Amino acid sequence: LLAIADTTCQKSARFSARPTPVSVSGTDVPDMESFLTNRVRKAVFPVGGLGTRFLPVTKAVPKEMLPVVDKPLIQYAVEEALAAGIEEIIFVTGRGKAAIEDFFDHSFELRQVLGERGKDAELHTIDIPVLEPGRIAYTRQQDPLGLGHAVWCARELVGNEPFAVLLADDLVMADTPCLKQMVDVFDETGGNVVAVQDVPREHTNRYGILDVASDDGRLAEIKGLVEKPDPADAPSTLSIIGRYILLPEVFGYLSERKKGAGGEIQLTDSMARMIGEAPFHGLRFEGTRFDCGDKAGFFEANVAFALARTELHDQIHSVIQKYAADESC
Ligand code: UTP
């Protein structure tokens, strides 16, 4: 009987987001096991990349610690995850990334100095990223073999349940956090969900691109995925951004460690192999995405987030006007 119950749970975890009701004395109540496996409770943050596009600064500072206005990219991503109901944070780090661990820990000296000087606002700011002990776990990707490999490194910490993946260098400005929009879709459809946006056709060779089976303008049902296709071969212009909700079955494919585009173990290659096994949707999220892995995108994010801050808006606006008016720029 136990074996049968177990199989039912795994099946429902694979194909549905909803808890399976079980009958106890004639009353339907949710099975607690399937509650655990059907909610998106964990988020993986791959931060093991080399950040070569931002050398030389990334020689000593992780790309994910670069600030947009005054907060590091990784803090925006973690806050987005928490706002989507994520309970456990998993960082996949690498050599030279210790600053990320320090950032999410207490800084006793700084707390003491700020306390002595009565700087309460600043004290609050440095305490925000510190979560309850046990809610953040770290694992290390010894070699940066690609995003797919980084996600695979988190397999033991994720276990057998759906999970989110957030790439901190994709920063999203949105009224409803992007991952929350995706979790809401997952609760309806189950399966894999990725955030997508249209890109100019000449840029398809920079992204994972969808082959679309059906599309209602908001949700696209996916029948194929291609990593960085040439514009002429791209099946659409809908590109995946760095937000994913994935079923744990992806780890089985990732464990084969097959290399894809650029000689790296690509996450999209393993995701593509799950098509047909479970629902797979692309969500055109509401909001603006900034590609902060790229210098121009990172700069634009700084402008947009600074303009959105009431205390900075006027000052930044006049700086932009000054340079816009200067024809020698
Ligand atoms: P990117 O390809 O944008 O990051 O990966 P990168 O390799 O660090 O940067 P460039 O291209 O050399 O400038 C997206 C995310 O995946 C992580 C990165 O840290 C980044 O957050 N990543 C990438 C890993 O964790 N491990 C890898 O092997 C590759």
Image: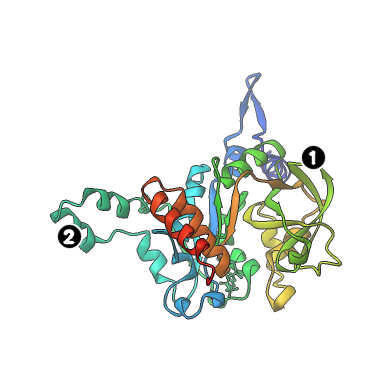
- What's the amino acid at mark 1? Asp
Label 1 neighbourhood size at 10 Å, few (<14), some (14-19), many (20+)?
A: few
Q: Position of residue 237 (x, y in %)?
A: 78, 57
| Depicted 45 relative to depicted 49: above or below | above
Task: Count every numbered label the image shows and give the total.
Answer: 2
Can residue 67 be seen?
yes
Please name the residue that numbered disc 2 is placed on: 113
Q: Position of residue 243 (x, y in %)?
A: 62, 54
Nearest the camera: 49 or 136?
A: 49
Disc 1 CB within 8 Å of nearest ligand 1 atom? no
- What's the amino acid at mark 2? Val
Instruction: Name the colour scheme.
Output: rainbow
Q: Position of residue 50 (x, y in %)?
A: 54, 76
Would residue 227 appear left or right of 304 to someone viewing this image?
right
| Depicted 69 relative to depicted 173: above or below | below
Q: Position of residue 305 (x, y in %)?
A: 47, 53
Residue 22, label in figure: none
- Considering only order in the chain, which callout, 1 or 2, is on the residue closer to the N terminus? 2
Please name the residue that numbered disc 1 is placed on: 216
Tags 2 and 1 touching, CB below 8 Å:
no
> What residue is drawn where x is 19% and y is 56%?
114
SS class, disc 2 = helix
Can residue 259 be seen?
no
Disc 2 CB within 8 Å of nearest ligand 1 atom? no
Would residue 243 appear left or right of 309 to someone viewing this image?
right
Would residue 120 appear left or right of 308 to someone viewing this image?
left
| Depicted 115 relative to depicted 296: above or below | above
Q: Quadrant of the N terminus?
A: top right
> What residue is drawn where x is 69% and y is 46%?
284
> What residue is drawn where x is 35% and y is 53%?
130
Q: Quadrant of ligand 1?
A: bottom right
SS class, disc 1 = loop
